[in-house]
Amino acid sequence: MVYQNLLVETHGPVQYIIINRESKLNALNRDTLFELHIALGDALHNKEVGGVILTGAGPKAFVAGADIAEFQGLDVDAARNLAHENQRNIFDVIENFSKPVIAAINGFALGGGLELAMACHIRIASDNAKMGLPEVTLGLIPGYGGTQRLTKLIGKTKAMEMILTAEMISANEALSLGLVNHVVIQERLAQLAEEILLKILKNAPLALAGAIASVNAAADATVNGFDTEIVEFAKCFATNDLKEGISAFLGKRKPNFKGE
């Protein structure tokens, strides 16, 4: 597919998905969200892709929010469908992606942009990044999982303050709250994201998928996370990767995992 609003670049097992609307601070309009859904599906089913780095074009913004102009004229039913479809087809897909997804937050991550970053498994921010959920200033609330994921990541007290005041926080404050994993100078952002992803990808792909599912289950009140962990642990014993991992460990050599 030829993308109009994304850049997709593959470097070995690492695939970059770049929101490419720099003049609009990479705001998420309908077309961009649709393309993102397609790109994620392609990355998931491409055996050559080990993991994804999600970022925005240019130095100013990761994603500065949704395209607010597209909200004009929506009624209650249309808004409900919009939130439901985008949560299900994009934000939940990222969170439950069986391959690791890292957000490289290069500047503003506001509204839907912060929601997009929070759906990723790991977040790295440049030192100039600003993050927030300013929806209440428009008469809205976050609609792409922001109220839920922010609360799970930093706790109810601070999440309530951020959402109700609509104030932005700095990268360093986000780090202190546990909202991001690392803060680096902007020039090293992509490099660190790739270093971390390549470190992850040295491990067994099927085990990574099981670990992601199990960690996500810890924050899902509808399932028993311990049961999920037991199931995912047991599934590893049906894989050739586990046999290879044990053989390599006992043979004091590096494993050669194949995702089988």
Image: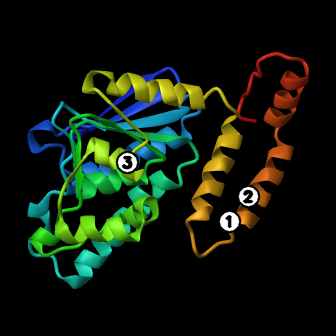
Q: CA distance from mark 2 to mark 1?
A: 6 Å
Work out whether 80 lies above or below 251: below
Q: Position of residue 95 (x, y in %)?
A: 48, 54
Work out whether 86 lies above or below 129: below
Please name the amino acid that badge 2 sits on: Glu
Location of residue 78 (image quadrant): bottom left
Location of residue 185 (image quadrant): top left
Look at the numbered discs 2 and 3 and tell me whether their residues touch, using CB distance below 8 Å. no
Looking at the image, residue 239 sits to the left or right of residue 228; the answer is right
Q: Position of residue 25 (x, y in %)?
A: 14, 43
- Of marks 1 and 3, which one's residue comes earlier in the chain? 3
For numbered disc 3, what is the local secondary structure?
helix
- The residue that mark 1 highlights is 225
- The residue that mark 2 highlights is 229
Please name the amino acid that badge 1 sits on: Gly
Q: Residue at x 26, y 34 (%)?
A: 127
- Of marks 2 and 3, which one's residue comes earlier in the chain? 3
